[in-house]
Amino acid sequence: MRKLKWIFVAMVCAAQMSYGQSVEQLFDTFKNKEGASTVHVGGFTMKMASLFTENLGVKSIDVLEMDGCSLETKQHFQQAISNFKDPAFETVITSNEANERTKVLFKIEEDRIREIVLYTTGNDCNLIHIKGDISPKDLEKIVEENKK
């Protein structure tokens, strides 16, 4: 009976942890999985890049690419993403295509975009996290310039 109680407590804790995962926790969970690759472009690199191009207030970019991962790992990622529910983020774009789902979320504070999270699940699983102090007008301008 005592073992059963501890198993139940462990299951509740695990459920709580997966429900409240942050973007950073998602990266930490999957970055070392076999077949996964990550790229981090930090503050120093972004400042250097701003000498050559406009960085629009972007301070860092993290990319998690999981194309080389097993189907089991991709399914685990999809489950973790489906449990990602941070009320500070607002869904801006959702796209559902055959075998692929993409979502773009913004965290907005004081009329500025502080974080952008873009993820894809399905055949290709990817997670992109951008932090900064981005003007919505600058972002809108880039989108307009790059429309096909």
Image (cartoon, rainbow, N blue to C red):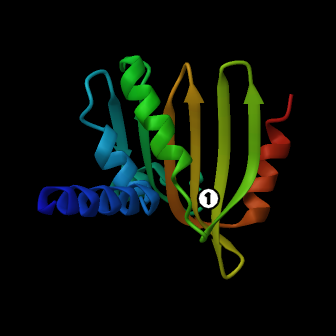
The N terminus sits in image quarter: bottom left
Residue 51 image offset from top left, x and y in percent:
48, 53
In the rendered view, does 30 fall on the left or right side of 119? Answer: left
Q: Is residue 11 above or below residue 110?
A: above
* Vertical comparison of 61 with 79: above or below: below
Residue behind mark 1:
56
> Where in the figure is residue 81, as x and y percent of width and height?
51, 45
Query: Dividing the image into 4 quarters, which one contains the C terminus?
Result: top right
Which element is circle 1 on?
A: loop
Q: From what the image shows, is residue 70 above or below residue 117?
A: above
Q: Amino acid at mark 1?
A: Leu
Q: Residue at x 66, y 36 (%)?
A: 102
Q: Nearer the viewer, residue 135 or 94?
A: 94
In this view, the residue in front, 131 or 14, is 14
At 38% from the left and 23% from the top, the residue drawn is 72
Q: Position of residue 29 (x, y in %)?
A: 30, 45
30 vs 138: above or below: above
